[in-house]
Image: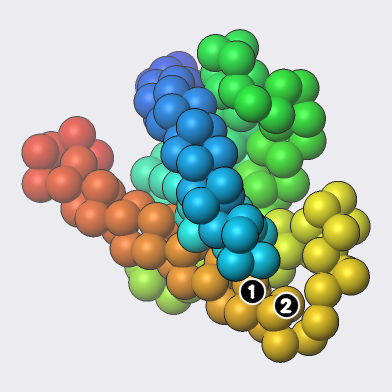
Amino acid sequence: MKRWHIRDIILVTIIAIFMGVIFWAIGPVYTILAAALAPFGLQPLANELLLGIWVMAGPLAGFVIRIPGAATLGELLGAVVEMFLGGIWGASTLISGVLQGFGSELGFIFTGYKRYGWFTLAMSTLTTTIVTFAWDLIRNGYAAYHLPFLLLLFCVRLLSVFVFGGVLTKLINNLLVRAHVLKD
């Protein structure tokens, strides 16, 4: 199994800084979207639609760096950047960062850190969705919602995480390989 080198630490830091700025920039978008959906009783959908962006540092770091712990570290460091930029959730962002990163890491754990393709990204998408949704059942009171609404929230979250943590991660990785920044 590959070990951490200074190049890997620099790369996870660059990914985290870049994604942390994006996380921070999405905060106001979330606020506007939640306000727009609130009159229809659909405010929680704002979180689900955007969650794929907020969890993207994990699968991106894990898929690009390919070392155990990279997904968790990438997501946590991205959360640190968001927090220090003044993100709307403050220090609680760190808890979310650890949980989101761990959720993403599970997908890589299940493939033994040996396969890096669509299957691994699909596993990471699924594990990220399950872990973060379980957390929101507790933290955001999702457990009080009726089953059909919960299923809608889960499916929207799964799609969002797949688009950003799966498809976009794969596209970015492919661009980095074509630019000879990474080996395939």
Helix, strand or loop at mark 2: helix
- The answer to whether 32 is drawn above or below residue 5 in the figure is below
State the residue in front, 15 or 112.
15
Percent x, y of residue 128:
63, 60
Residue 27 got which mark?
none
State the residue in front, 126 or 161.
161
State the residue in front, 25 or 33.
33
Viewer-nearest of discs 2 and 1: 2
Helix, strand or loop at mark 1: helix
The furthest residue to the front: 39
Residue at x 78% of width, y 35% of height = 95
Residue 154 got which mark?
1
Q: Are marks 2 and 1 in contact (CB under 8 Å)?
A: yes
Q: What's the residue type where badge 1 is placed?
A: Phe
Percent x, y of residue 151:
67, 82
Q: Is residue 79 left or right of residue 95?
A: left
Percent x, y of residue 181:
19, 34
Q: Quadrant of residue 145?
A: bottom right
- The answer to whether 178 is drawn above or below residue 19 in the figure is below
Q: Which residue is mark 2?
A: 150
Residue at x 27% of width, y 49% of height = 173
Count the marks: how many?
Answer: 2
Residue at x 78% of width, y 57% of height = 136
Residue at x 57% of width, y 49% of height = 34
Q: What's the residue type where badge 2 is placed?
A: Leu
Label 1 crowd (10 A; few <14 / some 14-19 / many >=20) = some
Residue 37 visible to the viewer: yes
State the residue in front, 94 or 10.
94
The furthest residue to the left: 179
Label 2 crowd (10 A; few <14 / some 14-19 / many >=20) = some
CA separation, marks 2 and 1? Answer: 6 Å
Percent x, y of residue 129:
63, 65
